[in-house]
Image (cartoon, rainbow, N blue to C red):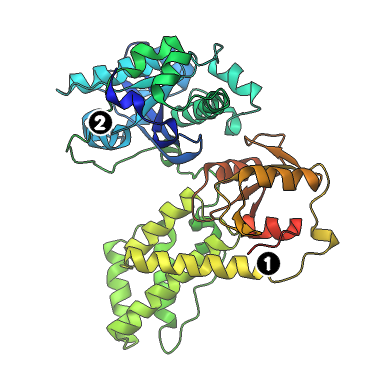
Amino acid sequence: MSPHLARPIEEAEFAVVDLETTDFQGEPVEIGVVVVGGDGETRDEWSTLVRPDGPIAPRACQVHGLRDDHLVGAPTFDELLGDLDVLFADRVLAGHEVDFDLRALRSAFALHGHERRWPAVCTRRMGFAGALQREAATLEYVPPEGAWHQALADARATAALLGIALDRARSAGIETLDQLAAHHPDLGDLLSPSPAPGSGLTPSGRTFTRLQRAGAVADGLELVARTIGTLPAPLVSGDGTAYAEEVWSALADRLVTGDEIRQLVAVAAGSDLSETAVRDVHRSCFRRAAEAAAADHIITRPEQRDLACVAALLRIAPDDADAIIREELARAIGHATSTPVGPAAALPEGTRVVITGEVPYTSGGRPLSRTDMAALMTSAGLVPKKAVSGLVDLVVVCDPRSGSRKAEEARTRGIRVMVIEEFLEALGVVTD
C-alpha cells in the first residue's frame, strides 16, 4: 500500500479538474481547477484558456463553443507547467470520468518533456454514474447561464458531487484514503500513485479566461463599472484634488499609459505636491475603491483581483492594501449591524439558506458548529441547504474576504447574500 493512502481524508486536498480539448484525445484548450478540502469545502479556484499547437476539431467546437480565434492571447500549455504543478502538488486529482482528464494532462505534460502521475478519484466511480449535468441536477446545481462544457463550470459541478461523496464516506465511518479505496474498489488503480511533489518549475502566473476574452467579469461587479463609472474621485485635503481626479480617471480602464503618467506628473508638479501628498492621494483613491467593493459586505474573487490591480497601479504595498480592505469591510459590516433588527428585517419562515465557511464565533462557551447552525435555522423556521441553486433564497458568508464561490454564484443568480454577523443578529443569537 502506498504510504499516502493512510492519510486521513480530513487532511487531504483534492484538485477537481475539468478539461476541454481540441478533439476527443486532443490537446487542452481550457482547464478549470477547483481545490476542495477533505471537508468538502471549496478553498480555491483557477481556470484559463490554452492556446494549442493544432486546430480545434469542428465536433469539439460544437461541444465547448471554443474556436481557434478565441484562443489568441491565451498561454500555451508549456507556459502553464509550473502553475499546474503548484495546483496539483501533494493533492489528489478528482474529476467526473477523470480518466479522460488524466490522459489529456499526462499527454500534454509528456509532449513538453515532463512525465507526471497523480493519485485521483472519480465521482462517477463514487456513486454518480450518470452524465455530469444529470447528476448535478439532482443537487439542484445549475451553472450560471447554463454554461455546461466550460471547464470551470464543470469543475465546480464535479466539486459539488465530490463534496456529497465525501459526506457519504464520513457517514459510513471512512476516515482514510485507503478505506475510501476499499469502499469504492474501482478507485484502487486511480489512488495508488503517490502525490506529486512540487517540481521547481516556475509558475507563469498567466491566465486568460472566457470572461477576459469577452471583456466581462463573472458577476458583473467589477470596480470599473461600480466605482470609477459611478462615483466621483475621493475628496482629499490640500491641493491634491486635481491630482486625485486625474488618478481616478487614469484608473478607469486599469491600464495607465505613458501619456497618462506624463499628465499625472504634470498635474502633481503644477499643484506643488510633495511625494508624501502624492502617496496620500493614492491611498485615498484605493480606499474609495475598497469602500465600494465592501459596500455589500463581501469581497468576491473578481473584486479581489481588481483591487490587487488597483493597488499595484498605485504602488500600494500588499500588506497596506489588505489593511485598508479590512478596515472598509469592518466599517461596512459595522454600519449594517449597528441598528437593532426589527420586524421588517426578520427572516421569513421557510427561507432557504446556504452557509459557506466556518462560523467564527462561540456561544455559551463553545464554537458554533454547522450542526448548531442547522438546529438554530430549523428552530427559526428556516430551511438549511448545502448547494447554491435556484431554490435557495439566502447565502450566508462567514468570511467576507474569502472570495467565496458560493457568494459569487449567489450574486450571479440574484440571490441575497448576508454576512454571518447580520445573520446571527437576525436569529437573535448572542455570541461570546
Please report contact status of discs 2 and 1: CB closer than 8 Å, yes or no. Answer: no
User: Residue type at mark 1?
Assistant: Thr
* Residue nearest the observer in this picture, 120 or 169: 169
Where does the image place residue 201, in percent across and percent down from the top left?
17, 37
Q: Is residue 368 above or below residue 67?
A: below
Task: Tell me the residue that label 2 is attached to.
Answer: 76
**Relative to residue 47, is residue 124 drawn left or right?**
right
**Relative to residue 155, is residue 432 drawn left or right?**
right
Q: Is residue 239 above or below residue 226?
A: below
Q: Quadrant of the N terminus?
A: top left
Instruction: Classify mark 1: helix, strand or loop.
Output: helix
- The answer to which image quadrant residue 99 occupies is top left
User: Residue type at mark 2?
Assistant: Thr
Q: Which of the two discs, 2 and 1, sits closer to the camera?
A: 1
Where does the image place residue 54, in percent across and percent down from the top left?
26, 18
Residue drawn where x is 28% and y is 44% of the image? 205
Mark 1 crowdedness (10 Å alpha carbons): few <14, some 14-19, many ≥20: some
Residue drawn where x is 56% and y is 28% of the image? 167
Disc 2 to disc 1, C-alpha distance: 48 Å
Where does the image place residue 41, in percent across and percent down from the top left?
51, 38
Is residue 19 visible in the rendered image? The answer is no
Give the number of callouts.
2
Residue drawn where x is 62% and y is 59% of the image? 365
Q: Is residue 25 above or below residue 299?
A: above
Of mark 2 and mark 1, the one earlier in the sequence is: 2
Task: Tell me the residue that label 1 is attached to.
Answer: 337
Mark 2 crowdedness (10 Å alpha carbons): few <14, some 14-19, many ≥20: some
